[in-house]
Image: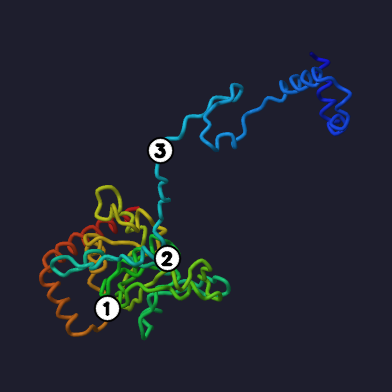
Amino acid sequence: MAGNRKSTRQSASTAPKYAESGSDFSEGETKSRKRSAAKPTRRKRPREANDEGDDVKDEDSPPAKKPAKAKARAAKPPASKPSSASTALAPPPTNRDADGSQSVYWLFKAEPLPRFENGVNVAFSIDDLRACTKPEPWSGVRNPQARNNMQAMRKGDLGFFYHSNAKPSGVVGVLRVVEEAKADETAFDPKDPYYDAKSEREKPKWYCVGVEFVRKFDEMLDLKMLKGFGEKGAPLEGMQLVTSSRLSVSRVSKEEWGFIMGLADADKVDGEEEKDAPSDEKDKTEAARESDGQKRADTTKDASEAKKGRKGKKSKK
């Protein structure tokens, strides 16, 4: 048998010669060679054998795999993340409660001391804001949470002006939002220190509001003092300035706002008048003050006592 296999391979390699000299072999020997050549060349049936519905399976072929279930799982579409632009398109409709007073207040940080970014001095103080003759864009913010806070602001909102990276740092006054969030133009300017190549004009990534000066405190409310009122159970315990001190634009609750304003008014030596506002805004402001006068007086009294208490502790050290 081994000899036959060897002979078969040899005959296969010289098939044309055997075809020409078929008379040299007997009919029986030819049949024997065909049978011996058929055994080692047994293979799977070609696909064409089933073209006419032939379902006969080859004994040597592996068992057919089970057909896939007809009900295939539908591919889940990839979860789409909200883009910066989509975040900007859904701001809250208002920042006023049922009484018309502001629900959420704000805190804006700026650096009053000279600091250069790409050769440009980015210092900006409350005195610089007071000198502005038109709304100042609060540009250059490149933190998503701070940007979202500006997108939530509404015209007329008040906020604290905070001197950052100063000695000391702290709240120095009040500003007002006069223009709601719009695309930050500095992100598109390659020469600007806060240029961002990923922010496209058709799909802005960064936004800013326009602000104006309202008031400068006679005395800075420094961060150390404010953090002292941020201890557990204290009035400023949950204030973003205390919990997220590196955030450049943060939220201030109505209670926190009232308490800090009480600290600023405690000594009654402000010496600064609020910037003149239109008569209708004055009327609204006066009405709000009358309705909330007693509450504000109580807050100021409590803040004044707290401030005096902290001064007494400091003098003992």
Residue 271 is marked as: 1
Residue 190 is marked as: none
Observer-side mark, 2 or 1, equals 2
Dot 2: few (<14), some (14–19), or many (≥20) neighbours within 10 Å?
Answer: many
**Real-space CA distance between mark 2 and mark 1, rounded to the nearest whole angstrom:** 23 Å
Residue 70 is marked as: 3
The residue pinned by badge 2 equals: 164
- Residue 148 falls in which quadrant of the image? bottom left
Examine the rendered structure and indicate whether residue 167 appears above or below residue 135.
above
Observer-side mark, 1 or 3, equals 3
At 14% from the left edge and 80% from the top edge, which residue is drawn? 283
The location of residue 49, given as percent across then percent down, is 59, 34
At 35% from the left edge and 58% from the top edge, which residue is drawn? 241
Examine the rendered structure and indicate whether residue 280 appears above or below residue 266.
below
- Residue 266 falls in which quadrant of the image? bottom left
- Residue 101 falls in which quadrant of the image? bottom left
Examine the rendered structure and indicate whether residue 107 appears above or below residue 211.
above
Observer-side mark, 3 or 2, equals 3
Give the side of residue 275 with respect to residue 247, left or right: left
The one nearer the camera, 268 or 177, is 177
**Contact check, label 3 and label 2, Cβ < 8 Å:** no
The one nearer the camera, 145 or 272, is 145
**Real-space CA distance between mark 1 and mark 3, rounded to the nearest whole angstrom:** 82 Å
**Contact check, label 1 and label 3, Cβ < 8 Å:** no
Dot 3: few (<14), some (14–19), or many (≥20) neighbours within 10 Å?
Answer: few
* Mark 2 or 1, nearer chain start: 2
